[in-house]
């Protein structure tokens, strides 16, 4: 039996400059990728031996300056793809207010065509096929799995265990371990699958203590339940699962997430991958909904670095998404 391994993966949804409510700045620009990402974010991670996985939205791949910067980053980070369907053919919406569409809402043939074109665009720009993928807004469905397999991907990282994003996008019973997802239900492992799902890190909180059968029936969009959750969160305690995402998760909860995954791996005797996520536009002041000043952006990165250092001290091994898949081959 292979030894239990605990991996730390830093992923970046690499996108154009945005603004309030994630509205896209027009004309579309990728200054955050050209300026802040290599200097403020990538360099301190590289000095720590961290090779992030940059998941590239179509407009970033098309931008010659952004693509040139990504290709010359030290340490050979992984480059993968990130589908925001507004900015890829067929039926693109170049003047869309923002990237709000979820790919699971497209007709199947349109989703396939957009994934195919995104993959081709990556190959044309970088001369190789991408291995890792994440859906924009986590809006993936089971039907996406065979599409990604057919296009040569070996990893998806769109699932957020215990969390929900839309009525059709719920991962309330998904496992927190790497697993091969079933095309009929993303929350269910399918041993015969080829594509490895490496979920984003989540601190389950009180919600994670509910029995699986309760979480299967849980409907956060029922009006009465939605009202209760909002009121309980404000007045008593935040019961919602917390994403491993420093933009709106406190440092205390981020460190608790590291500890929770550490204990989970040891308790279950299984290898695990703790995936942190962020957006590249959060490194640039005013290019995201949260941070207007350079100091705020710097504090975000400093928080991420503190969490990375803490995970490394606890024995987590830095890796890219594709490296985790390759190392865990045969264990899942």
Image (spheres, rainbow, N blue to C red):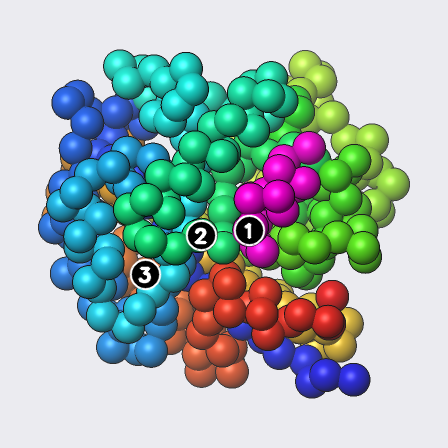
Q: Earlier in the sequence, mark 1 or mark 3?
A: 1
Inter-mark Cα distance, 2 to 3: 29 Å
The residue under label 2 is 130
The residue under label 1 is 153
Inter-mark Cα distance, 2 to 1: 7 Å
Cβ–Cβ under 8 Å for marks 2 and 3: no
Task: Inspect the magenta stretch and tell me whether residue 190 lies in it.
Answer: no
Q: Left or right: 309 with respect to 151?
A: left
Please provide the residue range marked out in magenta: 143-160
Determine whether the residue tagged by mark 1 lies in a helix, strand or loop.
Answer: loop
Determine whether the residue tagged by mark 2 lies in a helix, strand or loop.
Answer: loop
Task: Inspect the magenta stretch and tell me whether residue 157 lies in it.
Answer: yes
The residue under label 3 is 303
Q: Left or right: 182 with respect to 167?
A: right
Kindly tell me whether residue 236 is visible in this rendering: no
Q: Earlier in the sequence, mark 2 or mark 3?
A: 2
Which residue is located at x 25 percent, y 77 percent?
Answer: 47
- Residue 329 vertical position relative to residue 240 in the rendered view, above or below: below
Q: Give whichever of 112, 248 is nearer the camera.
A: 112
Residue 82 picture location, percent across and down: 43, 41
């Amino acid at each position: 039996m292979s030894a239990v391994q605990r991996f730390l993966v830093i992923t970046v949804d690499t996108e154009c400059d945005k603004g309030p409510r994630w509205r896209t700045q027009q004309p579309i620009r990728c200054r955050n990728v050209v300026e802040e990402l290599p200097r403020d974010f990538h360099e301190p991670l590289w000095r720590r031996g961290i090779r992030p996985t940059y998941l590239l939205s179509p407009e970033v791949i098309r931008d010659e300056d952004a693509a040139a910067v990504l290709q010359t980053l030290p340490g050979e980070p992984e480059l993968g793809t990130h589908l925001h369907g507004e900015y890829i053919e067929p039926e693109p919406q170049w003047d869309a207010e923002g990237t709000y569409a979820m790919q699971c809402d497209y007709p199947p043939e349109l989703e396939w065509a957009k994934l195919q074109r995104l993959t081709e665009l990556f190959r044309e720009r970088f001369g190789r096929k991408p291995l890792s993928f994440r859906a924009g807004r986590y809006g993936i469905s089971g039907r996406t799995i065979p599409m990604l397999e057919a296009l040569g991907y070996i990893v998806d990282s769109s699932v957020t265990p215990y969390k929900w994003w839309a009525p059709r996008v719920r991962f309330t019973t998904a496992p927190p371990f790497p697993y091969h997802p079933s095309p009929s239900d993303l929350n269910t492992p399918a041993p015969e699958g080829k594509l490895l799902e490496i979920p984003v890190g989540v601190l389950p909180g009180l919600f994670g203590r509910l029995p699986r059968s309760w979480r299967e029936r849980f409907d956060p969009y029922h009006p009465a339940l939605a009202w209760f959750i909002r009121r309980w969160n404000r007045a008593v305690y935040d019961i919602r699962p917390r994403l491993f995402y420093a933009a709106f998760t406190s440092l205390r909860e981020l460190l608790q997430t590291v500890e929770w995954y550490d204990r989970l791996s040891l308790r279950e005797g299984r290898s695990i991958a703790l995936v942190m996520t962020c957006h590249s536009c959060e490194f640039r002041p005013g290019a995201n909904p949260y941070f207007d000043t350079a100091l705020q952006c710097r504090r975000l990165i400093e928080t991420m670095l503190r969490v990375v250092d803490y995970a490394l001290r606890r024995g987590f091994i830095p890796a890219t998404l594709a490296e985790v898949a390759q190392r865990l081959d045969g264990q899942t």
